Image (cartoon, rainbow, N blue to C red):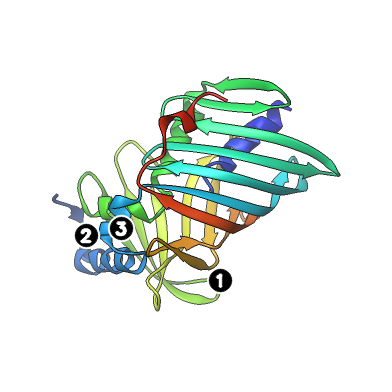
């Protein structure tokens, strides 16, 4: 059960000045500026920093593909709550995961456990920073550095990649569709809570829907070291300026 609780941590962050850059700085900036417009514009993205989404799909747990339904409440820059029910071989398991920016709790089968491993907490913060389009404008400022990854194919479609770096944390690679300017993939090295080992995590955004004038993911697939970890459909989503702090209290 401990393994199951730790595995749930990764899922919770899965369901939005001067700059030191290299020679392609103008092109890189343009890619991000176009992405900001495509996702709803800087005014909307800076106003709506929170989102509540309901989802359903599948999730890999201990080598078993489980059905999953749930709700994620996300508040940028560093708060997330995930309430989900796993269907493992016909057995329903309810799991609540909360990260309030400082503390991380996982609750399952009537027991709540605080995760105090600093490596896991650091990984959660880094994943939160890479989550959502509201961070795009931040990447145009210090202390972030940008590098071009050039033209690539993502799920068979033309995209352009950018690597975002910040001292003291893992790099994040982002890939934008060349026609729509929408984010279609993120990639980063992160900690697998179930194994304690670093993995390459790739997140694919497979379609968008519009809410409050902004583009919100419709389907998301997450892979770890090339193997599918989660594939979910966002069945309902609503954007907010802010969620109450009580949402992120200890479960």
* Mark 1 residue crowding within 10 angstroms, few (<14) / some (14–19) / many (20+): few
Image quadrant for the C terminus?
Answer: top right
Residue at mark 1:
155
- Left or right, 251 with respect to 28, comes to right
> Does residue 202 show up?
yes
Look at discs 3 and 1 and give the one toward the viewer: 3
Return the residue at label 3. 44
Judged left or right of residue 210, residue 46 is left
The residue located at (52%, 37%) in the rendering is 81
User: Residue at left 69%, top 30%?
Assistant: 3
Asked whether the residues under the numbered discs 3 and 2 touch, taking CB atoms below 8 Å apart as contact, a structural biologist would say: no
> Could you tell me how far apart the alpha carbons at marks 3 and 1 are, in whole angstroms?
28 Å
Marks 2 & 1, CB-CB < 8 Å contact: no
What label sits on residue 129 in the rendered view?
Answer: none
In terms of sequence position, does the residue under pointer 3 or pointer 2 come before the other? 2
Q: Is residue 44 left or right of residue 183?
A: left
Mark 3 vs mark 2: give the one in front.
3
Give the camera-side residue of 82 and 226. Answer: 82
Disc 2 vs disc 1: which is toward the camera?
Answer: 1
Q: Disc 2 designates what residue?
A: 22
């Amino acid at each position: 059960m401990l393994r199951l609780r730790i595995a749930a941590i990764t899922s919770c962050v899965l369901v939005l000045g001067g700059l030191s850059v290299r020679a392609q700085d103008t092109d890189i900036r343009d890619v991000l500026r176009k992405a900001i417009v495509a996702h709803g514009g800087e005014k909307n993205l800076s106003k709506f920093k929170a989102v509540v989404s309901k989802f359903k799909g599948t999730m890999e747990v201990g080598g078993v593909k489980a059905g999953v339904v749930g709700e994620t409440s996300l508040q940028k820059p560093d708060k997330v709550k995930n309430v989900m029910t796993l269907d493992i071989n016909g057995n329903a398991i309810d799991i609540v995961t909360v990260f309030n920016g400082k503390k991380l709790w996982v609750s399952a089968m009537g027991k709540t456990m605080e995760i105090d491993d600093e490596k896991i907490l650091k990984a959660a913060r880094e994943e939160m920073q890479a989550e959502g389009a509201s961070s795009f404008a931040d990447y145009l400022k210090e202390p972030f550095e940008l590098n071009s990854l050039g033209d690539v194919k993502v799920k068979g479609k033309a995209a352009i990649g950018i690597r975002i770096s910040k001292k003291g944390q893992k790099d994040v690679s982002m890939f934008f569709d060349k026609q729509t300017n929408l984010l279609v993939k993120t990639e980063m090295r992160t900690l697998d809570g179930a194994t304690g080992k670093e993995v390459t995590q790739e997140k694919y955004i497979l379609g968008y829907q519009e809410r409050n004038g902004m583009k919100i993911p419709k389907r998301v697939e997450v892979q770890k070291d090339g193997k599918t970890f989660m594939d979910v459909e966002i069945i309902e989503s609503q954007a907010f300026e802010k969620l109450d702090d009580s949402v992120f209290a200890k479960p």
